[in-house]
Amino acid sequence: MIIQAELKCKQTGCEADPCAVDKVIELPSPRFRLFSRALLADYDFIAENKNAARHDDDARHCLLILDAEGKDGFLVDPQGHNYARYSAFVPNARSLLTPDIGIDRSYLSPAEPWRDESRDEMLRMTLRVDGKPDYTLVLPADEEYLDDVKRYAKLNLPVSSWELWDALDKVRLQTDDILYMEIEDYFAFEYLSPHLDGLDISLNELNDLAAQLAALDEVQGIAFEGMFSIEVQRKVNANGGVITLQDLRDLAVSAKTDCYHVVDAADDAQLGLFYAENEFVPELDGISDEVFEMLDFAGIGRMMRCSENGVFVNSLYVLRDGELTTAPPVQKALPGKPGYLFRLTLGLHPDIGDARTVTLDLPAAEAELLDAQEQLGVEGWEGVMVIDYDGIIPYAADFTDLPMELEEFNAFTKAARDIPRSEVPKLKALLEQFEVRDIETALFLTEHLADYVLTPDLNSPQETAIDHLRFMTDDHSAELLLSHVNLYAYGCDLIREDNAVLSPYGLLHRADYQPMLSPMQETQKMEMKMK
């Protein structure tokens, strides 16, 4: 009997809380697995349902997240957040449901391909810049510390060109700084960990490899793992050194060719039976059925596997029988910033059965929007969906109902185009700070950037304190004070006094140092003054 369970070492007791399930949500199996591996990430199904969890003293009120194709689940008490702030794995959770409990299955519908977490999150990593000991980010670190030290960025690879540059906006490399990368989660490619660890690989090279892996379907992924295992063993046998980045890229490209076979066989016995039944063993030609039944299929399978250098992967047998394809070279340095500001790839809904697509660079003239509709054979945007998005503001498409609001989004891209490039990080900081979810608010912020000040060089309370000390006195006196001041506490007080926040892009506050109200609150304040 197999039971899924989370075991704790030397647990002295168990003090379980009574938990009331206020809502049950089903997720597609790939998304449930992703959720189970990254409980502290933000999720739409939590953000949109966190208010369904009530609050009282009788029990912990939770959401129950179920695997649509499995029995297990997670209890989640978000405490008003968009992630699983408190969670507990519940084996066989589905068996606990009573007939009167409804299940929200709205998250089972296919999401837009460009928002598919199972496709996008091939690798998870953190970037940072080593600085002075007081404010160097050291991983692993607790969430409070991460919130206070903002000079880092997390990426779920592969990412688009503008997403790479956005990460560098957050890291804010200075002259002679060295970019530090740490891979935190390999997801389905955990077996690559000992080979990528310590490998001389740049961010651009790693992103390119992740893109190659993300493009593999299920069978190709199994073929890649099998050929990877074969290549590792070949190097071991030949004392041929370590697996290189080029080796991995060649294998990823070759997994999309016909240089291998994948057989439905989980062990030597099944493999031997497959070879014998399909007449791949000449010595068995003409034997009777009675003798056939007496054959040692495990021995036959083992003999064939060893002679072919094949391997078993996830209950399948992988055999390489052709030359690998050499992947084209990729540069170490990041490519230049894209020539477009915003780019959409549009296509028709799969139900329409038409594979036409069109790429649209924004901002665009009205004639270009109409031409895109003509290329897709539609009038208006009904039946059209976003296949891919990239932009100088990577998450801008999240607060727009695309493509239905494409005209409004086009107006926002025009406003973003017209602001100085140096102001783009400020706009991004404001969009994140106010958690903008509608195009009208985003446009409002583009018109009021002068009301705010962003200082990219200040990334932590400590740096804020040092900057203030140097403003009040000369550098020599400031240096003498540093060892006598609690820089963290002093910096926190300064940030609070200035009604500022540490955004991922630097210290952000209003130009007049008044509290930072959301655009909606600002509008309400102006209306009250007019009255």
Image: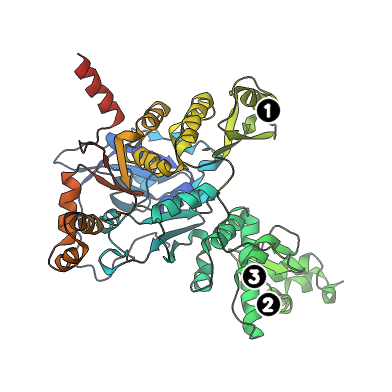
Are dots 1 and 2 in contact, CB under 8 Å?
Answer: no
Residue situated in front as seen by the camera: 466 or 162: 466
Gap between marks 3 and 1 measured at Cα: 40 Å
Q: Which residue is mark 1?
A: 376
Query: Callout 1, which amino acid?
Result: Leu
Q: Which residue is mark 3?
A: 247
On-image quarter of the C terminus? top left
Q: Badge 3: few (under 14), some or many (20 or more) residues near its Cα, within 10 Å?
A: some
Residue situated in front as seen by the camera: 528 or 313: 528
Residue situated in front as seen by the camera: 15 or 515: 515
Are dots 3 and 1 in contact, CB under 8 Å?
Answer: no
Secondary structure of the residue carrying numbered label 1: helix
Secondary structure of the residue carrying numbered label 2: helix
Q: Which residue is mark 2?
A: 302
Query: Callout 2, which amino acid?
Result: Arg
On-image quarter of the N terminus? bottom left
Task: Tell me which label, 1 or 2, sits earlier in the chain.
Answer: 2
Secondary structure of the residue carrying numbered label 3: helix
Q: Residue at the spot x=19%, y=66% of the render?
A: 476
Q: Residue at the spot x=64%, y=69% of the render?
A: 246
Q: Badge 1: few (under 14), some or many (20 or more) residues near its Cα, within 10 Å?
A: many
Query: Callout 3, which amino acid?
Result: Asp
Identity of the residue furthest to the top in this view: 531
Where does residue 273 sit, x and y in percent of width and height? 72, 68
Residue situated in front as seen by the camera: 369 or 46: 369
